[in-house]
Image (cartoon, rainbow, N blue to C red):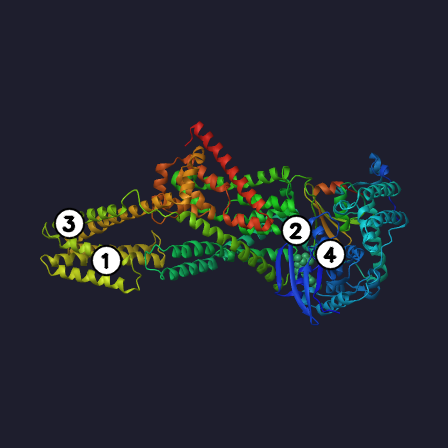
Amino acid sequence: MTRKRIVVALAGNPNSGKSTIFNDLTGAHQHVGNYPGVTVEKKEGACRHDGREITVVDLPGTYSLSAYSIEELVARNVIIDEKPDVVVDIVDASNLERNLYLAVQIMELGVPLVLAFNMSDVARARGIEFDLEKLSRFLGAPIVPTVGHKGKGTKELLDAVVAAATRKTAQDMPNIDYGREVEEEILKIAAALQTEASSADARHVRWLAVKLLEGDKNVREKVSRTVQEITEKSESHLAKIFGDPAEIIITDRRYGFISGACQEAVRSTVEARHTMSDRIDAVATSRVLGLPIFLGLMYLVFHLTFTLGDPPMGWIEKFFGWLGGVLETWWPKGSESILKSLLVDGIIGGVGGVIVFLPNILLLFLAIAILEDSGYMARAAFIMDRLMHKIGLHGKSFIPMLLGFGCSVPAIMATRTLENQRDRLTTMLVTPLISCGARLPIYALIIPAFFPGRLHAPMLWTIYIIGIVLAIVSAKVLRTTIFRGESTPFVMELPPYRIPTLKGILLHMWERGWLYLKKAGTVILGISILLWGMTNFPKKQTFDRDYETQTRQAEAACLDDVRGLNSKFGLATGSDILVRAIQAELDMAAEQKKHHETEPGFAEAAKRKDAAIEALGRQDGGDRLMKFLEVRQAIRDARAAFDGAVLEKKLVEGTPGYFAARSGCDAALANLQKAEPEVYAAAIRYLDNIRSSFEGAAEDVAKARQAEELAYTISGRIGHALEPILKPLGFDWKIGTALIGAFAAKEVFVAQMGIVYSVGEADEKSEALREKLKADYSPLIAFCIMLFCLTSAPCMATIAITRRESNSWGWALFQLGALTVLAYVLTLCVFQLGSILGIG
Amino acid sequence: MMNKHLPGAASTPRSGAHGAKPLAMVEAGKRVRLKAIQSGRELQARLAAMGLTPGIEIEVIRNQSGGPCIVAVRGSRIMLGRGMAHGIIVG
Ligand SMILES: Nc1nc2c(ncn2[C@@H]2O[C@H](COP(=O)(O)OP(=O)(O)O)[C@@H](O)[C@H]2O)c(=O)[nH]1
Ligand SMILES: [Mg+2]
């Protein structure tokens, strides 16, 4: 016989230890994806045993194989359509009766079956004894006791798998006797099926007949009208006899079969499975303490995720900063290389922006894995259900929404804990409305610019509350429209509390972290490059204004002012040595801009300047000039020493340390002033007026040039093109352009506004930017900006992750579209209403 | 073995006399027998798969007004939403 690959499918109830055994079997050789078209996670792995290659497919955890949930349907279709060589059912041996219900259904399918009696340690501790041989005969499948988290029984399980896969004759699988009346109907339906289908074997036909009687929609759709009619007749016949629908009777008989088998082959001292768990639950789910405990744990999760994650985030940021710096030295300084810009601004900026969240994400999933594996997650759902029920969701949806305050990306990934598709999509779609951390810089920029101090905190709260209310209302709306349907009934098992294993939670954490890196990373990389292109191209060649002349004019004005200093400290009014010295300095600065510090050109420029000044020093009035330069340097040094001390020792104004540093600096300056009052006055005037205003002017010119370049690029043009649409919201093209940047990542909004407004190095603390904003917009518009940023198009990382998690571009684009429309309509109403009422 | 009530009998208003009432009305700590599940086939099947079949004995572990309730059935703890607890008739 050919030694082909064995394909094994793992089935089992949720919490039976399926993941643990899957991880134990396959180790690191795993592949996680989604089943096509649905959000059900598909895990595959491989291992070797006895020289045989074995592929292990992890089926979703289910209680049954009916077609009532996607998970069950997926599990069933894999078994029927993909025909694995062996199905392994992981059974929680400490809760046998309920777990065997699934085993019996797989047995009825007639596929080669191996039962793993997992949690056999727990079962033994409870004093449960099994007659495995007898049970095995009842169920028509070999049974292997295992202890998942200790790896016990794995080898024997694989032995049984290989034996089952290589057995030549099909094993004699027992049938369940459904009782005379039901069996008669099964025979009738089977006969009808047999005449139609040509090749189906008897066992499969019987299975189909049972499924039809159970009212299985999926099977019913696939059979002919005649068979459907016969089934309906049988159903009403049985309903008349028993007074219950057929599926109730069938289920009942299955459990009857199981109890029969257990009565003969299982001896149990007492049912004590939950004593410890129940005791914990008496506190953890109690009316009084349940909520405080839950909130405390949630606070801890938050703390772990967003505080402990901070230092590694800093390291990653530094690393990418360093990497960008290194790459930059490959090109001459100030070069306009497109490749450099793409690498540094586009790729490193974009990818770095994603990877920087990795510590957060890993920590978050670590916390979630602990909560899940210990069994607490189910209790959290219990506690929050009462509140969440009011918006048409279940308790479980609360956790992702809470995480949304940190970042929407891990929050949307956390919706994986929701097994119901409608709940999951609803939660996924509304989560971006919860104001995430990246939106805070926008509020931090705008609120102080437009609102008086006493309104700062209330304003911020208002924005956050609006987000929460919008999320709640949207969830409710989604549940009554697109995701309508009887509010999915809430049924969930509370697994007994268990101490999670380190390996288990680390694997859980890594699995999800890796997915984030891999999939979201590739999509985000693509979009970053696209956005980079949009804000950089097309390049403007000829500018509307002559920025070079403007720079030169600013320089000339500066030198003019410098000439005015001559008479102030004893130089002849007509002397040009000071002007020439300053000119030499400016030339050096201009030259040095073209070189990295390590390049020879950098030092040469400095040398040239020094030589020029030395020559000037030998000229008439040279001693005065040297005095001026000396005093100026001394002032600079004293100020730098003070700034350095404040920065290094983190001195705060008002503290003794700060005062000491301040007075040290003041004393040094006073000494200088006493020695050379005239030169000192001239140097101060130079530093604080002439030089700084020149630098400001030069900066303004550079930023104006940047703004013109930006307006010319695609995103600038889109901003302009959007203006007519944005006008009714009170927004101009500048805001439009910044909003495009905000799509890349919300915090980019602030930087982009800085560029548009020609303000150097804009951040949320920028006073200059605030002044300009105040001049252009009213508080009403400011509020509208915040409202729009809160509600509108979630950032591209969110879209990418929604696409991944929902397994469809449709939902991702729907989210993008719907939230943008919502933002538009809402902002429009607020702005128009506000304008009419004359607010702002 | 199937001591099934007839459809008419189960839904008579006087069924209270036999103690038949929704699970939602049973206090915590009580042991009751499941009589019927008033819901669609889908839900009945789901509950059955989790061990909730007519005739089975269940213990109410927790039952707070307005929230979900927890029952013990066939050795496991099952949480049932409020709406569902109203549709499960026990006696
Ligand atoms: N005592 C005991 N615990 C186990 C065993 N197998 C798994 N577990 C634990 O049971 C919990 C749930 O296991 P998991 O594999 O996540 O269950 P799944 O829902 O079926 O995937 C984890 O905390 C495991 O460490 C076992 O054989 N004995
Ligand atoms: Mg699992």
Image quadrant, ligand 2: bottom right
Q: Nearer the viewer, mark 1 or mark 3?
A: 1
Q: Secondary structure at mark 3?
A: helix
Say yes or no: labels 2 and 4 on the same chain: yes
Alpha-carbon span between mark 1 and mark 2: 69 Å
Alpha-carbon span between mark 4 and mark 3: 91 Å
Left or right relative to A150: residue B21 = right
Q: How crowded is the residue under tag 3: few (<14 C-alpha within 10 Å), some, or many (20+)?
A: many
Confirm or reject: label 2 Cβ below 8 Å from ligand 1.
no
Residue farthest to the right, as pictured: A180
Instruction: Work out whether residue A151 or residue A181 is closer to the camera in this orientation and state it.
Output: A181
Which picture quadrant has residue A149? Answer: bottom right
Q: How crowded is the residue under tag 4: few (<14 C-alpha within 10 Å), some, or many (20+)?
A: many
Q: Are marks 1 and 2 in contact (CB under 8 Å)?
A: no
Q: Which residue is mark 4?
A: A79
Alpha-carbon span between mark 3 and mark 2: 79 Å
Instruction: Work out whether residue B44 or residue B76 is closer to the camera in this orientation and state it.
Output: B44
Q: Which residue is mark 3?
A: A563
Residue A87 appears at what percent x and percent y? 74, 60
Say yes or no: labels 4 and 3 on the same chain: yes
Q: Nearer the viewer, mark 3 or mark 2?
A: 3
Q: Which residue is mark 2?
A: A379
